[in-house]
Image (cartoon, rainbow, N blue to C red):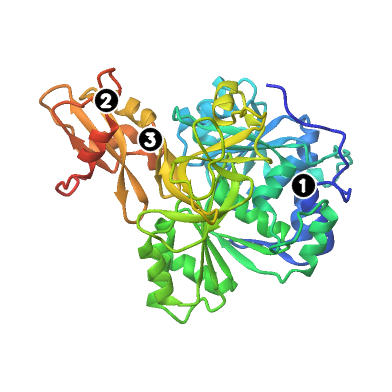
Amino acid sequence: MTEMRVLGATGSSGASDLSLSGLLAAVAAAVPQRLAVVAGARRLTFAALDARATLVARHLLDAGIRPGEHVAVLCFNRAEWLEAAFGTWRAGAVPVNVNYRYVAAELRYLLDNADAVALIAERSLAATVARVRHELPLLRHVLLIDDDAPDRTDGVDYEAALAAAAHSATPLPATGGDDLYLLYTGGTTGYPRGVMWRQEDIFHVALEQRRPGTPRAADAATVAERAARATPLRMLVLGPVMHAAGQWNALSMLFRGSTVVLSTDRVFSPTRIVDLADREGVHIVQCVGDAMARPLAQELLRSPGRCRSLTTVSSGGTPLTPTARQLWRAWKPTITINDNYGGSETGVCGSAAARLSGKTRRFAMSPSVAVLDDRLRPLPPGSDQIGRIARTGRIPLGYYNDPEKTARTFPVDADGRRWALSGDYGTIAADGTIELLGRGSTVINTGGEKVYPEEVEAVLKAHPAVADAIVVAAPDERLGQRVSAVIALTGPRRPSDKELRDHCRQRLAGFKVPRTIRVVDEVKRTAVGKQDYRWASRVAREPAPALSR
């Protein structure tokens, strides 16, 4: 697919440059010595982050990476993730976020689909890619970040590359708001898909922080001026920056001139997170639903005198339950709890406008967000009709290498107006707020991770003892939803849950593995042979003995 990129924009030093790399350069020039990133033992000022991004850019250009080509970034939360992303943008190339939980087959699919020509990865994670590199003919350059793993993967050492780039005089290409921002997210077939945005558009709909009533920034100079005036805050980003929620929160704080504190632990530990938040004096904690928010609140209740600077909890990816909210307010009644609504295809659309009411949430949305009927016409406020939540205006260009899904997700109405369908259904109240009812597909949102049933079903049915399977969401107090499987067997032998999960783990990322497995005599299907998801959902919710391990 031809890259949708315009090279006639001003360079990274131009005041009108609304590229992401240009915005970092402008903010770094305005607040060079302000702390930008805390990641483990590493602490980077804005000047240092900007300089490191330039070194990454020069290395990529010297390695033959051309503007518009795609560079995959595969690592856990660490400062190098941000350096690599900004450096790739500064080189005029396009960073591709890669889920570090993916197994070899999933990595092969994503890197092939994204047409990745280079990979910046931690050594331990690159080892998995090495097993399928012979199936990736476009991948010609690998940059390895040290993580104390054995040095068995071919590639260039990251720090050595940056040290050499300090002597490079390679000119940087022009950048601008038309440059491509590519975000890979799950797809309805179970495979990830790349959402293509203009960088200026993703900045305005997901990354720009401004006071109510303040106009959108027209240029990088305005963003820099606002950052210089803003009171520096510290946000602890717990979500992985290879996901939209963690990445967008981190970038928005940087463009505000504030500090991003990354949790670099590989395993979620509430005790260590609270220690980090207390030590760094963070003001905001970004989390992904109850899976993070509840244990953190419980840990703080055990040590109520800690984290005195913490004033705000911000959740995205999956809504917080009433239980989580009650725990946080039990710790600090004045705590601000922000639930944000949005998605990879729509950007940040709005925030919770009221407390939980029944099983639904009401959100105050951007004026560009509407609830559409079946003919893509916005429903009027106060309508009791259920419709599809969608956004118009600044929306993605489409999906990379997938015109069919682009046409379905980004349709054009009778007046020639393009919409981005969120996949969610809702109603619009008389006051214009939108009540979120849920997704219109079978996608499972477990702890902020999206799981697509067809993919898991195919893996389960590949087990010799499984004749048929349906995978559905079951309610989970901590994760919001959990992956649940209903299976029928080929014979009298009943494989243990552990055996089935081990089978899945060899082929799927861990979050896709069923947590609950129900065995039935026959999997019910509709008259036309499709899975009966309603029946399977009822089966999955039935009480069952403790799971075998």
Location of residue 138 (image quadrant):
top right
Q: Please tell me which residue lies in front, 237 or 373.
A: 373
Q: Amino acid at mark 1?
A: Ser
Marking on residue 463: 2
Q: Quadrant of the N terminus?
A: top right
Q: Please tell me which residue lies in front, 208 or 69.
A: 208
Q: Position of residue 134 (x, y in %)?
A: 56, 21
Q: Amino acid at mark 2?
A: His
Identify residue for label 3.
Answer: 442
Q: Please tell me which residue lies in front, 394 or 40.
A: 394
71 shown above or below 363: above
Callout 3 environment at 10 Å: few (<14), some (14 to 19), or many (20+)? Answer: some
Q: Identify the residue at image location x=54%, y=69%.
A: 312
Identify residue for label 1.
Answer: 21
Please, what secondary structure does the residue beneath circle 1 have? Answer: helix
424 relative position to 468: left or right: right
